[in-house]
Image (spheres, grey):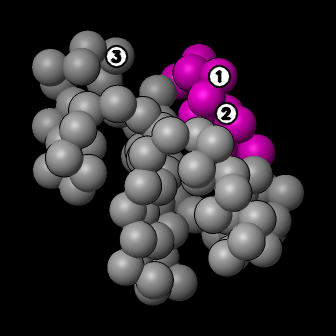
């Protein structure tokens, strides 16, 4: 399973998403993004927007933003 979390260092919403993945013992890769929205081209490419966090679950064909949505998805689908 390939799960990737796009995150910004120091972002509390990104930390919340990462904690959910850690609590569920999900193996994932963190892609650290630039602080400037205009520099987040990779995030825009995968999700259509530049905000973080963004979770990409290739095994389930899911890409999503918003920490609350990510936490719910992890708890319901990946835990």
Q: What residue sits right under mark 2 in the picture?
A: 15
Give yes or no for contact between labels 2 and 1 (Cβ–Cβ under 8 Å): yes
Q: Whole-percent x and y of residue 10? A: 59, 18
Say few, some or many: other residues with alpha carbon within 10 Å of mark 3 (under 14 / 14 to 19 / 20 or more).
few
Magenta part of the chain:
9-19
* Mark toward the start of the polypeptide (3 vs 2): 2
Give the CA distance from mark 1 to mark 3.
14 Å
User: Is residue 72 left or right of 24 when viewed as pictured?
Assistant: left
Q: Main secondary structure of the magenta part?
A: helix
Q: Whole-percent x and y of residue 7? A: 47, 36
Residue at horizontal 24%, vertical 19%?
Answer: 37
* Mark toward the start of the polypeptide (1 vs 3): 1
Residue at horizontal 14%, vertical 37%?
Answer: 41
Give the CA distance from mark 3 to mark 2.
15 Å
> Which residue is at the far top?
36
User: Is residue 7 left or right of 13 when viewed as pictured?
Assistant: left
User: Is residue 40 left or right of 29 when viewed as pictured?
Assistant: left
Q: What residue sits right under mark 3 in the picture?
A: 35
Residue at horizontal 68%, vertical 64%?
Answer: 74
Give the vertical position of 6 relative to 21 (above or below): above
């Amino acid at each position: 399973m390939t799960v990737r979390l796009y995150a910004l260092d120091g972002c509390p919403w990104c930390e919340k998403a990462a904690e959910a993945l850690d609590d569920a013992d999900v193996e994932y890769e963190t892609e650290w993004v630039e602080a400037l929205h205009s520099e987040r081209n990779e995030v825009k490419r995968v999700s259509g927007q530049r905000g973080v966090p963004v979770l990409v679950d290739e095994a389930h064909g899911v890409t999503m933003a918003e920490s609350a949505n990510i936490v719910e998805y992890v708890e319901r689908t990946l835990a």
